[in-house]
């Protein structure tokens, strides 16, 4: 990615938006472009947290657990960041990151992120504020994952997938391109139970199934069902 384009992407991200152009240009030069295909993991639980990332295009889901115990914690969209805790301690990853579409991300090395604190007045406060918002968001996501039933988790996942490009609206179509078993792995549920839940959401009028796609027919109701 051209440095100017990378700087523009970073400038739209809340984690770096307070930087001046000089800071963005320097960060763009230090960043590394990573291209992922759908289903490819950028990092896994326990991997060294040596970089934070910004989504340039596509979408990434943050995953807790693995196998049958896997749950999608959140979905990160273009110009949003993830893996920011790497800037604090560089310890092992507590969750995995996986592309849910063909995706391009910019990796910001921890050393470059910490260098911003020393070289740009006021950025330390902005960085801590941004990371604080991330921690609160993930804490809320974790609470939802713990207390939502399977139908609520499926509704929440559908909204997250629909909002990977924009705010979900009635009439949006999700060309899932994945099996119900794969959806089940994202929400910690079996294929059979996910099929039952989708049928129930369809009976409620939240969605309509059309072949391998889902149409959102009542986003407001789907959102209420996704809340604790």
Image (cartoon, grey):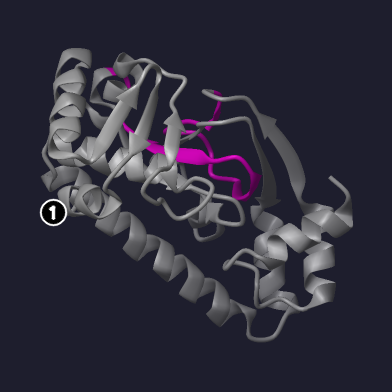
Q: Is residue 143 left or right of residue 125?
A: left
Which residue, given by chain and number where applicable, does mark 1 sit on? 228
Say above or below: 101 vs 4: above
Residue 25 at x, y = what percent? 84, 65
Residues drawn in magenta: 40-67
Say above or below: 209 vs 115: above
The front one of 28 and 161 is 161
The local secondary structure at tag 1 comes to loop
The front one of 66 and 80 is 80
Q: Residue 27 in magenta?
A: no
- Quadrant where the C terminus sits is bottom left
Residue 147 at x, y = what percent? 11, 46
The front one of 148 and 116 is 148
Residue 199 at x, y = what percent? 17, 25
Q: Residue 46 in magenta?
A: yes
Q: Could you tell me which residue is drawn at 50 percent across and 61 percent down?
A: 88
Q: Is residue 200 left or right of residue 4?
A: left
């Amino acid at each position: 990615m051209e440095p100017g384009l990378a700087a523009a992407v970073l400038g739209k991200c809340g984690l770096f938006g307070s930087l001046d152009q000089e800071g963005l240009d320097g960060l763009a030069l230090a960043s590394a472009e990573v291209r992922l295909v759908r289903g490819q993991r950028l990092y896994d639980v326990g991997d060294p947290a040596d970089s934070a990332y910004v989504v340039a295009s596509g979408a990434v889901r943050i995953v807790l657990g693995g196998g049958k115990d896997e749950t999608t914690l959140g979905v990160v969209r273009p110009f949003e960041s993830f893996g920011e805790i790497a800037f604090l301690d560089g310890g092992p990853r507590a969750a995995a990151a996986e592309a849910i579409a063909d995706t391009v991300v910019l990796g910001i090395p921890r050393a470059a992120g910490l260098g911003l604190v020393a070289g740009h007045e006021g950025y330390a406060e902005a960085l801590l504020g941004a990371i604080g918002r991330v921690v609160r968001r993930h804490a809320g996501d974790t609470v939802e994952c713990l207390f939502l039933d399977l139908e609520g988790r499926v509704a929440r996942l559908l909204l997250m997938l629909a909002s990977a490009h924009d705010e979900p609206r009635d009439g949006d179509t999700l060309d899932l391109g994945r099996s119900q078993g794969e959806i089940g792995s994202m929400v910690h549920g079996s294929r059979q139970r996910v099929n039952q839940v989708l049928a129930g959401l369809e009976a409620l009028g939240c969605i309509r199934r059309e072949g391998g796609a889902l149409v959102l027919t009542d986003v407001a109701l789907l959102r209420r069902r996704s809340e604790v």
